Structure formats: structure tokens, C-alpha cells
Amino acid sequence: MSLKRELKITYGIETLPENDPYIELAESALKLFGEVTAPSACLADVIPILKYIPSWFPGAGFKRKAQLLNAELNAMITVPFSVVKNVMKADNAPPSIVRTFLEEIESKGHNATAEEQKIIQSVAGIIYMGAIDTTDSVLQMFFMAMLLYPDVQKKAQAELDKVVGDDKLPSFDDRKNLPYVEAICKEALRWHPVAPAAFPHMLKEDDIIGEYFVPKGTIVMGNTWSLLHAKSVYGDDVNEFNPDRFMNPETKYPDSAFGFGRRICPGRHIADNILFILIANVLHTFDITPFKSSTGGTEIPSSDSFVSGLISRPMPFKCQFTPRATIASMERLAGFE
């Protein structure tokens, strides 16, 4: 779902129901990205001098993987961008971020220069690649939480039934009246952050942290997990999925989940809106229950089992979606993405 959504938002591209080349390329690149960025996957991270050996050298498989990943990531950026440009020439390009950028330049009386196109292409690529894995991971956390904490699901559905009713789907206009659903979105970001160890940053000036002097130029990494599990901020039950903590308006929004400083996630506001509208609509329309096998048993995911890699996500699990909405709501859902 996320790949299709991000392609549409960023490039205005509608994907095929099956065997879509954009989806296949993205999934291949993301799989390889996870392998390359997994802890200890690159020997050069442990023995830096290895970065100088040629890619054909025995044991240099990490370099060959990096070269393949570079080619696939480059294709992810350049191919859809070229599609938007060609469709714009035919004057029938659907709305998208890339189209907006290019039209803004054209409104000044000239076509985008090669440098401007490179900037737009890079920005669009960052938006696309930065969101397709992280948003889905948060949603997986949400589904896992609904299986492990069914009372949370029932409480949210009661709020949705009262505020939204049974003849329509939740909208952004309902958001201000759905504080518990809002709290679930925040808790999904906080409970198991998708980037528990943030990306490296470098100090621009000397600093003192507690008893330690940290000189300018030091590479530091924010401990997102620790910040979002600080008992002094979020209470003693930080390991539990408890949206009630955010019913207190003074509880800090889990903005650390999006990174820090100048390189904080630029799409965090879009991600926040996407999470709300998806979570609200899923809860309003379905009961999320454990998957029942053919033998009658149920599968409950473990809150401690996660796939290793740069992006944290639960180990694969199954769940069932049982419609709970009226026919009118289901008919509306048919046209919702």
C-alpha cells in the first residue's frame, strides 16, 4: 500500500494491480538496502582499510552489493522522474510533487535547467524512498499492538462510533474530535520507533554532555529508543502500548521518532496525516483479530521479535480483518485508498 501511495503522491503514477515494474524495483532495492545496512553487514565498518580493496577481491561481496544497490536506487529516482516529464509534455500529467516543482519553475518563463532538474529529482527521490519503508513499519507496529492490546482497539472504536457514526468514514475534519485515535497514532510512533538508533550527526561546535566533553567534529547518534522510553517523560509503563499517556496534553509528542536537527524527516507532517487517516479508517471499518489457522489455533505476534536492520519492523505475522461497518461505509471504502 505504501509504495503505491508514495508513487502517486510524489510522481502521480498509478501502479498496476500485479507485477508493477515500479513496485518490483522498489521492493528489490529496499530488500538490498536492508541487507547492506544491517549491523556488521559491511566489513569495512569494522575494518575501514577494506574499503580500498577491489570489488572482485574475495570477501568483497559487500562492495558488489553496494554497487548493485547504487544502481537500483538510481533507477528508483530517475525512471519515475522521466515519466513525469514525458507526461507533462503531453499535457495530461496528474497532480504530484514533481509536477508542482517543475510547473513552478516554468511559471517563471523558462524550463528547468539541468541543475534544477537534478535538485527536483533528488528531493523527490528522498521523499519517495524515505517514506515507503518507515510508514509501513509504523503501521505494522499498530497492527501488532491491536492484536496484543484488544481493549485499546475497542476503546478507539467506541470513540469513532460516537463521533463519526456508522454512515460515513472518518475524515481529517473529525481529527480534533478523536483524541484517543490521535493518541494511538502517537503511541504507535513511540512504542517501537522504526529508527531506534538515529542516523549519524556531526557536532558543529564543542559541547559538554553531563560529565563528558565532546569536541567539534565528533560523530554522534541520537538514542531514539532511550528518549522515547524515558520514564520521566512517558511514565513507568514505557514498554507497554498505552495511548492513555497521550490523553494528557502535557505529554511530549514523540518527535524524536522522526530524527533530529537539520536532517529531521522532511515528510513528518505528511506521515503524521497518513497514519491518522489510515488508522482511523481501519479501526472504524474492521475488527483486527489474531489469524486463525486451519486447525483452529491462533497466531499472536511477539512484541520482542523484530527484523534486524536500519529500519526496525516486527517479524512477519498474520491477522484477520472482520468488517464491522455498515453497508454504506463499506461502499465508501471501496473508493478509498
Image (cartoon, rainbow, N blue to C red):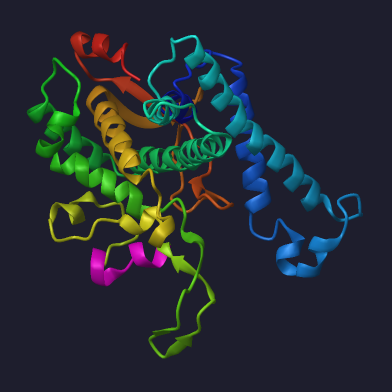
Residue 147 visible here: yes
Quadrant into which the N terminus falls: top left
Depth check, front residue: 5 or 331: 5
Depth check, front residue: 102 or 163: 102
**Which residue occupies the extreme right position in the image?**
57
The magenta segment is 225-235
Is residue 253 toward the left or the right of residue 198 in the image?
A: left
Residue 130 % position (x, y): 48, 42
Residue 286 % position (x, y): 28, 24
- Number of marks: 0
Q: In which quarter of the image is residue 33?
A: top right
Point 24% across, 20% down: residue: 324
Point 47% across, 32% down: residue: 318
Residue 149 % position (x, y): 30, 44
- Give the prevailing secondary structure in the magenta stretch: helix
Q: In this view, does 248 lie above or below 105?
A: below
Residue 235 visible here: no
Depth check, front residue: 107 or 50: 107
Q: Quadrant of residue 332?
A: top left
Residue 73 % position (x, y): 64, 38
**Which residue occupies the extreme bottom position in the image?**
211
Q: In which quarter of the image is residue 32?
A: top right
Is residue 40 toward the left or the right of residue 327 in the image?
A: right
Point 35% across, 20% down: residue: 337
Point 50% across, 42% down: residue: 126
Residue 318 highlighted magenta (yes or no): no
Depth check, front residue: 145 or 110: 110
